[in-house]
Image (spheres, coloured by chain):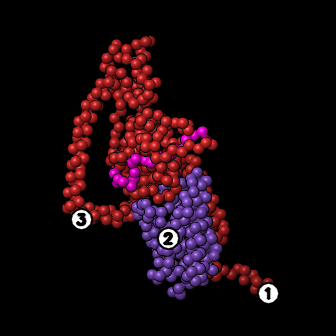
Chain colours: A purple, B red
Amino acid sequence: MHNSQLKFIYLSLLFAFICLLVPWSGIALSLRPDFMLLVIIYWLLRAPNQCNVGTAWFVGLLVDLATGGVFGQYALAYTVTTFVAVVYQRRLVLFNNTQQLVYVFLLLVLSQIVLLVLKTFAGNEWLGWAYFLPSITGILIWQLAVMLGLNTGKHSRG
Amino acid sequence: MVQGFHQNLEQQQAPAFFARGPSPFARLVFFAALSLTLIATDSRLQYLATVRENLMVLLHPLQLIANAPSQLYQFTNEYFSTHHRLLNENEQLKKQALKQDVALQQLNMLILENANLRDLLQTNQTLVESTALAEILHVGRDPFTKKIIVNRGSNHEVSAGAAVVDAAGVIGQVTRTYPSTSEVTLITDKSLAIPIQVERNGLRAIAFGHGRDNTLDLPYLPANVDIKRGDKLVTSGIDGVYPVGLAVATVTDIKVSPGSPFAQIVCEPTGGIEKHRQVLLVRTPQVDIVNNNTPSQTSGKKNNAEKTQPQTLKQPKQQQNSTKPQPDNANKPHA
């Protein structure tokens, strides 16, 4: 069972990565949710034994590679975010849908804030509040996935 | 007996539900330290450039898969484009070609004339740049930087530093090359500066990308500088990166505040990534261009040109194709 779950984790991460690589431009780029982080948060809730801070770090490194930025920025942002998610993981699975949405939103915003701090240190400017739009589209996608039948709540007994 | 029972409990392994390896905090500290080290290494030292290049090769197939849907869409769009639209476009292109043909005829004459004049002045010949056509693959994914990725890389002899232009003007500069793609930093990026010249009066300055909006700034110019709204800025060519005389931007706004000795000049780039898919990568040959006089330069240089004229009469047409700095040759007769 564990092996098949691991396969699912990697497949979903690969899919999210391809979504990231799609040539986004213009408004779509500024609205593009953080697919990788969403998938990682999902697997953190469902399978914390297989998907952990380390996984998030590696995935962050991949995202760094894809965005062409300095290595380690997304890695650090994902590490911090997943740490918070892991600490509250047991409580999170018991949350109802709305509470979970708020929590996921806060996680997404947290990762963006970490990234913003790193970028500001590197000499970049504040991009305006539109910078946080991907977090909103992120929870919209989360909600869409839940409505399509994705089980983000209690562990299934299978 | 009781003690033994306790020992038994302690030796017992925790149930699988609680077995999570090192604590999350330990993991956080470890991986955060690792990330910070990477950030420091990558931004201050240049060790990771080759690593990145090699990893990008592995990423390429995934990129192709990701590009497939949009390319398929474009292909079908082109395939099913209406007869009417094609006819219109054809007509437009013919008109454009006719206009450009006329201009080209004059250009040939001007090139010859220019070459002759340069011979007379014994200045260096203008350098012929090598160009390559590239197509924009996608816009950079980092919202903080203005970058695009084009489909020509080090396999196609593109190297970092090449200028990137489109039909309307300069777009940017190649900053990183991968085997089959390369990364172009746009002139609107905060980290890119481009030496320009005001077309109207030949004033030279350096334009910096603004970063946030799609504009350029002209900082460090005095408040009484002779720049008007609507002035066209072209490349000055003194940097050896951008060819001379390409359109860069148009001045859109000038603000002078009493508190500052500098004028605040905002310019809008002429070329744009939104308008075209194809761009031209221009590689200027690396030579000493310090003495490469251009005809559009101001009076100070004209004196220089007058000085060299008598020498021209003494030794006509000997250094036609010399790419050496001119004074070396020019000083010989005196020595």
- Residue B292, image quadrant: top left
Relative to residue B204, is residue B83 drawn left or right?
left
Question: On screen, B113 above or below A156?
Answer: above
Q: Is residue B185 visible?
A: no
Relative to residue B320, is residue B263 drawn left or right?
right
Question: On screen, B183 above or below B11?
Answer: above
Instruction: Residue B3 in the image: state x and y as whole percent.
Output: 79, 84
Q: Which residue is mark 3?
A: B80
Q: Which residue is mark 1?
A: B2
Along the viewing direction, whichever of B182 and A98 lies nearer the viewer: A98
The answer to whether residue A60 is magenta is no
Query: Which segment is the magenta one?
Result: B260-278
Q: Please name the amino acid that badge 1 sits on.
A: Val
Question: On screen, B214 above or below B333?
Answer: below
Q: Which residue is mark 2?
A: A137
Q: Please name the amino acid that badge 3 sits on.
A: Phe
Give the alpha-carbon distance from disc 2 to disc 1, as whole Å. 59 Å
Q: Please name the amino acid that badge 2 sits on.
A: Thr
The residue located at (26%, 38%) in the rendering is: B103
Along the viewing direction, whichever of A101 and B219 lies nearer the viewer: B219
Instruction: Residue A62 in the image: state x and y as whole percent.
Output: 50, 61
Q: Chain of mark 2?
A: A
- Residue B6, image quadrant: bottom right
